[in-house]
Image (cartoon, rainbow, N blue to C red):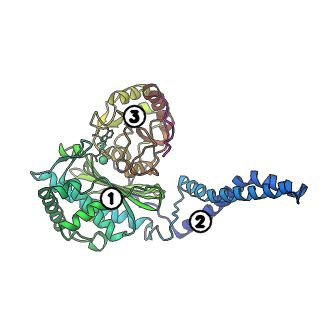
Amino acid sequence: MCAKRPRTPPTSTPINTNINAVLFSLAVCLGILFTIAPYLAPCFVDFLLLPTTTTTLLLHRASVSVCSYRVASAIPFARRFCSNSKLQFSSRAGSRTMASGGAYARERRVAELAVQRAAVLTRAVYSSRVKGTVTKSDASPVTIADFGAQALVFSALDKSFPSDNIIGEEDSADLRENNDLSSLVWDAVSTALSASPGHESDLGSVTGQGQMLEFIDKGGHTDSATGRVWALDPVDGTKGFLRGGQYAIALALLVDGVVQVGVLGCPNLPGLNEGEEGVLLSAIRGQGTVVKPLSGDLDAAEPRKTTMNAITVASEGGFCEGVESGHSAHDVQARIAGKLGITKAPVQLDSQAKYASIALGRGEIYLRLPTKMTYEEKIWDHAAGSLVVGEAGGVVADMYGRPLDFTVGRTLRENKGVIAMPRQIAEEVKKAVLDVAVEHYGPPPPKSSL
Ligand SMILES: Nc1ncnc2c1ncn2[C@@H]1O[C@H](COP(=O)(O)OS(=O)(=O)O)[C@@H](OP(=O)(O)O)[C@H]1O
Ligand SMILES: [Mg+2]
């Protein structure tokens, strides 16, 4: 159980923003200096020795054009440098909200409220007789809860951040073909709206079935690398949801391909107090991870800071994995655990509740090794969870030890498998996973040419 000392999360101040701006400028200058030096040198020497020859003029011109290309490439270099070093920077002026409580405080608050409102709907759908399950083209199930939760969260994003882009797991095609199912989703949405009134100025509303379908279709964005992009999995672990197991409502904000805010609502995880059910975890890059009860007044709830168990050898820990044997390779995961000397049996949980659990210190390692090398993990299955774990003192990587690359669209096609663990044992776990992965799947595939 996680019973950490309540603590207010650290906040960013305008001073931090200025420091970030100065550091960013420094990174640009450094990028320019390092990248153009080799090209300026011959130009300078030639200028001294043969100032009037045609060769010098041509060399000079070539150097200048290479320099301008290099100067241009120094900007993305600096941006990446700043993102990697956890300095929050966004290319779009005014795109980061500095509300009371620091950078991205407003985004976090709206995301938390939206996830909470969606959880009212998913819980109601679970308790009702009809789940309206349909099977998608990839053979995975989708229910009234998935569609309804997506409509509610997108209504909130549309109200609070109307110019942001959205990547969402679902679309309304099945509903437009099946009016009975669409009506059931609308019933669930309107019931959830009346059951959780308030916050309309932040969360908006859904005025009818037509608008609901329009909201559901707002998640078709494909470019995850540019500007502000929200990624939503309205019901992650739909199979878990249907069998009364774990599921999560997972919402993240990416800015220029870097996850800056992550929120996980886990309605069926044990709560923070005896007899309570449901937790709401949230993280802002550079500000740690906090947890609140999923129910109740979120503005009044004191956020508790949570950190992973700081074990120093992997054999002291336990690992969690997915329930479905088709989603991750249980046999390969067992081999890795054996190599690490882990003796505890794995804990099987559906959804990003796995990320939530280890961020709460209710487990240490998450292993997700592929059953098929052709499978591309989805951005909405990892964006929120990876930040929640990263900010709780963890490291998230793929099975070859590479950081997750959220810049390549709706999937993580440059990564294979996912692992997460406390940073103290990251190198040990990464090495064991890499050895087994190379043996079982072969060396890492080259970067895609797309
Ligand atoms: N073949 C394969 N490999 C890996 N992952 C897959 C695969 N097929 C589906 N999915 C995605 O798995 C998401 C659910 O992940 P879980 O961690 O809940 O899986 S598990 O059931 O606990 O094993 C699930 O998310 P939801 O559809 O939101 O439930 C899928 O996006
Ligand atoms: Mg999912």
Q: Residues under labels 2 and 1: Cα distance?
A: 32 Å
The residue beneath circle 3 is: 373
Residue 295 in view in this figure = no
Other-residue count near label 1 (Cα within 10 Å), few / some / many at <14 / 14–19 / ≥20 = many
Q: Classify residue 93 as left or right of residue 139.
A: right
Q: Residue at x 25, y 61 (%)?
A: 151
The answer to whether the residues at label 2 and label 3 have Cβ atoms under 8 Å apart is no
- Kindly identify the amino acid type of the residue bearing the numbered disc 3: Met
Report the side of 115 relative to 105 (left or right).
left
Q: Could you tell which of marks 3 and 1 lies nearer the N-terminus?
A: 1
- Tag 1 residue: 219
Residue 436 in the image: above or below residue 169: above
* Mark 2 or mark 1: whose residue is earlier in sequence: 2
Q: Position of residue 235 (x, y in %)?
A: 26, 51
Kind of residue at badge 1: Gly
Location of residue 367 by image quarter: top left
Which residue ends up furthest to the bottom in the rendered image? 201
Q: Which residues are magenta?
A: 442-450
Identify the residue at the far front of this view: 54
Q: Which mark identifies residue 21?
A: 2
Residue type marked 2 = Ala
Horizontal and vertical percent for residue 32? 68, 58
Using the image, tell me which numbered label, if any, was put on residue 168: none
